[in-house]
Amino acid sequence: MGRLRKFSRLVMAVTAVLIVGPLLLWACPVAAEPDLAKALVGKWAGGVRGSFNGNRERVLVIDSVTNGAAEGRFGFSEDRLGKIQIAITGDPARPRLEFTTTGANVLVPWKLTLEFDKVLSGTVYLPVRGGSGRLEYPGRFEKAE
């Protein structure tokens, strides 16, 4: 009887860990915040890809990450950066970053997803010259530091 009781307790303990453990992780997204900040904070170099004719290169600096948002700076070069607010959504393992910049007096939305720990890739929506509407171009950044 003693062996059966020990085995029963072991099964109950393993079951509790397998059921309660994931529930605790799901209920406590704050635990992932430091890892998300570690993954995102820093300088990112890259820009517009594809058949875009303008200046392709951009710099994204993410200064801080808190509560599903980030503060950063964005521009053509490190000496020409403007402040931006970044919304962070989705799975902390593959967060989606959305922000809007200003280019030639128009708003330019960016939507990027963290890929492979040191790569942000997604889409930039650039305005059509001389007309209305937007064209989608690939955007890609690699973490520089």
Image (tube, rainbow, N blue to C red):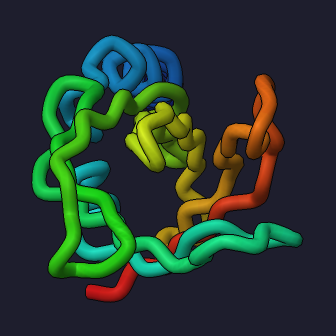
Residue 100 appears in which quarter of the rendering?
top left
* 37 on left or right of 99: left
Q: Residue furthest bottom?
A: 144
**Nearest the eye: 13 or 66:** 66
Compared with 11, 105 (above or below) is below
User: Picture coordinates of residue 74 (x, y %)?
Assistant: 30, 59
Look at the picture and state if 113 lies above or below 141.
above
For this view, does 93 lie left or right of residue 33? right
Above or below: residue 87 compared with residue 139:
above
Q: Is residue 74 visible?
A: yes
Q: Residue at x 35, y 87 (%)?
A: 144
Q: Position of residue 118 (x, y in %)?
A: 48, 75
Q: Nearer the viewer, residue 132 or 76?
A: 132
Left or right position of 84 against 97: left
Residue 102: % across, % down:
39, 41
Is residue 69 or residue 72 the one in the foreground? 72
Give the total of numbered labels: 0
User: Which of the 4 image quarters holds residue 111?
Assistant: top right
45 over 15 or under it: above or below: below
Left/right of residue 72 with respect to residue 48 in the rendered view: left
Q: Residue at x 24, y 34 (%)?
A: 85
Residue at the far right: name it.
Answer: 51
Placement of the C terminus among the 4 image quadrants: bottom left
Task: Work out whether residue 1 can be spotted.
Answer: no
Locate residue 57, reporting x and y percent: 52, 79
| Residue beneath the point at 28% across and 40% down | 32
Residue at 59 percent across and 49 percent down: it is 113
